[in-house]
Image (tube, rainbow, N blue to C red):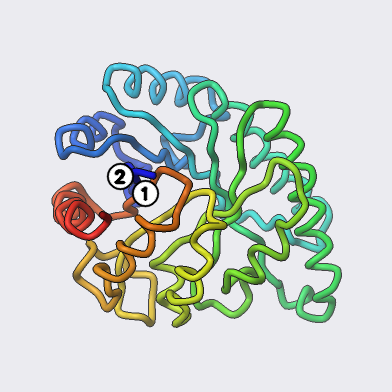
Amino acid sequence: MTVRPYFASSSKVWEDVAWIFGIEEAGFAGWEISADGNYRLDEPAKKKRVVETLASTTLDATVHAPYTDLNPASINDPIWQESVRQICACVENAADFTDRVTMHPGYLSPAGKLLPGRVWDQQKEALRIIGRCGEENGVLVCLENMINIPEFLCHDPYELLGITGGIEGIGVTFDIGHANTVGNVGDFLKEIGNASHLHIHDNHGSSDEHLPLGDGTIDWEAAGHAIAGGYHGGIAVVEGRNLDEAERSLQIFRRCFV
């Protein structure tokens, strides 16, 4: 399957939405909307501005659900309920223009570390509720692997696939940059056929730098070949900091993802 490049930048969620015209000009096929800041889809005025601007381009879209201060694995029930509510609200609003939403897993709070089994159960129940919401709205909600912060769930593909397995309406987003921070890009590439969605960016293996492809330590020749040969999700989202770096990533993408 041909992999189409999209672009996303969470660092721009406080900027005017007009910057997205540069995504189209750079040659990307779509925009992954980071649904936070000025781009929250559960606020009608902000959603209207995003949808109207998107419609004035030829770009397709996917969405990254909000995650700031949310924890869908929380053992504090009001926090858990609000986290699930906000993600479901994002899914319902995103359904107007996409069929794919990425979400972050939860994490172990200091209290949660004492009850890891309950944290796991809370995350599973959150996924069941969010998955039903996704199915009702024609959206596949994809849980993403996380960076090298020990408290987060889902650092490797086996945990990610295990926690999502058998839950209707839920898929997985493989983030190759995140995988590099925990030293297991190879494991994710071995399981690339199970990925529903894909995020790509570079780093030096220790922190989530979101560098352009080729500026860190990931072997994009090998990764791109493996992805082009085994990934069935159809979209790869370059997560970057600005449009100049996005264009550099797109050059590497066009050379390696064949």
Relative side of 120 to 43, left or right:
right
Residue 212 image-quadrant placement: bottom left
Q: Position of residue 235 (x, y in %)?
A: 40, 44
- Disc 2 and disc 1 in contact, CB within 8 angstroms: yes
Mark 1: few/some/many CA within 10 Å (<14, 14-19, 20+):
many
Classify the position of the C terminus by image quarter: bottom left
Q: Position of residue 253 (x, y in %)?
A: 23, 55
Residue at the spot 74% in from the left edge and 61% down from the top edge:
73
Query: 251 above or below 218?
Result: above
**What amino acid is labelled 1 in the image?**
Val
7 or 16: nearer the viewer: 7
Residue 58 image-quadrant placement: top left
147 or 138: nearer the viewer: 138
Relative side of 251 to 180, left or right:
left
Q: Position of residue 24 (x, y in %)?
A: 21, 32
Residue at the spot 69% in from the left edge and 48% down from the top edge:
83
Residue at the spot 42% in from the left edge and 77% down from the top edge:
181
47 or 243: nearer the viewer: 243
Inter-mark Cα distance, 2 to 1? 6 Å
In the structure shown, which secondary structural element does the residue marked by tag 2 occupy?
Answer: strand
**What amino acid is labelled 2 in the image?**
Pro
Give the total number of marks visible in the rendering: 2
Query: 30 above or below 174?
Result: above
Instruction: Name the residue beneath numbered marker 1.
Output: 237
Residue at the spot 42% in from the left edge and 38% down from the top edge:
33
In the structure shown, which secondary structural element does the residue marked by tag 1 occupy?
Answer: strand
Residue 248 image-quadrant placement: bottom left
Relative side of 12 to 111, left or right:
left
Classify the position of the N terminus by image quarter: top left
Instruction: Name the residue beneath numbered marker 2.
Output: 5
